[in-house]
Amino acid sequence: MRRIITATIVGLTIVSSSCATTFDEKLTTKLEKTASEAEAGQASALVTEGDALWAERDNADKLKGALAKWEQAVKLAPSAELTIKLARGHYLLGDSHYALADNNEARDAEYQLGLDWANEALKLTAPEYVAAKTGGKTHPEAIKLAPKEAVPAMYWYAVNLGKWAAGKGLVTRLKYKDDLFATMTHVKALDEGYFFGASWRYFGSYEAVAAGLAGGDLGRSKSNFEKGIALAPNYLGTKVLMADLYCPKMQKDEDSDGQPDGKVLFKKLLDEVIAADPNAEPDVAPENKLEQLKAKKLLAKIDELF
């Protein structure tokens, strides 16, 4: 029997909490300092140590170690590159390790940390955006001024903000909905292939969750997910999201075996993920291994979802 479940996605999530919270977006960076030669040397050594740990980020302790090294380094020698690493790393810790362990409190705390670092990254890479916001422009207006160099900062800002807002309840999610949509629209316009077709994953997820609720469309969802898969077929996260968010909402048309089409595609996508070589995309092999764990966990719920 199919069960209606809460679906969490980047920027659009239905949750049970009703507590609204506002993200404290400071427009002046806390990282304004010039490192001395000694500080720069210390920071470089810490980054090297952190990078070595990051290579094994599918291990939670190694990932935490990498983040600790980078956080020490960024205080000595601030850089946009380090803030982006920290935004991505805290997101990964929350969205994979803690989410897989069903530790929602720790998961949401990581989104908060990721958001704080992404906010710093955005200020360092998009001064035009900061100037526009300071001058009274709304986020959707100001973010259009961010240059292509700010794409990584914008992306990790959006995914951390989306997941953070989701954990705070429906009111907060709605408060930031337009900001998130505008940010990801700009990311897509500047670099549609960034982080293995991330903008297509976002809009595939958005359309799936909004279908039947807020003007979403399953046809557009399917098209967006398929575009993301075509752009980066060896990044496994897109198939996991498609299975999780799109498949349960497919019409209950029966296939030749008498099973709902959504169920058939759900199993097909997750089986492909589980059987895939995670090292086929070396830059995200650790993420792929974590996505395979997500796929196994999701596949075990097939009879609850359909």
Image (cartoon, rainbow, N blue to C red):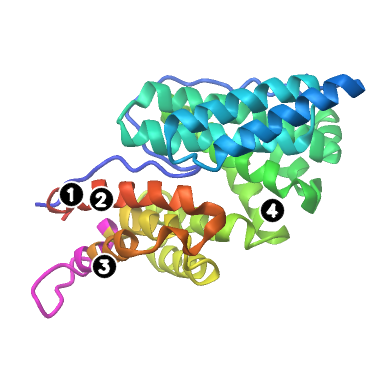
Mark 4: secondary structure: helix
In this picture, residue 211 sits left or right of residue 37: left
**Magenta-span inclusion, residue 34:** no
In this picture, residue 290 sits left or right of residue 230: left
Residue 199 visible within the image: no
State whether residue 167 is above or below residue 252: above
Disc 2 crowd, CA 10 A, few/some/many (<14, 14-19, 20+)? some
Q: Label 2, label 3: how many angstroms apart (C-alpha)? A: 12 Å
Q: Quadrant of residue 130?
A: top right
Return the residue at label 3: 268
Residue 148, image x, y percentages: 78, 53
Return the residue at label 1: 300
Q: Are marks 2 and 3 in contact (CB under 8 Å)?
A: no
Return the residue at label 4: 186
193 or 14: nearer the viewer? 193
Q: Check disc 2 and give the amino acid type.
A: Lys
Residue 237, image x, y percentages: 43, 54
Residue 213, image x, y percentages: 37, 49
Q: Check disc 1 and give the amino acid type.
A: Ala
Q: Are marks 2 and 1 in contact (CB under 8 Å)?
A: yes
Q: Check disc 3 and give the amino acid type.
A: Lys
Disc 3 crowd, CA 10 A, few/some/many (<14, 14-19, 20+)? few
Q: Residue sitting at 69 percent across and 35 percent down?
A: 48
Return the residue at label 2: 296
Q: Label 2, label 1: how many angstroms apart (C-alpha)? A: 6 Å
Q: Residue sitting at 69 percent across and 20 percent down?
A: 72
Mark 2: secondary structure: helix
In this picture, residue 18 sits left or right of residue 145: left
Magenta segment: 248-266
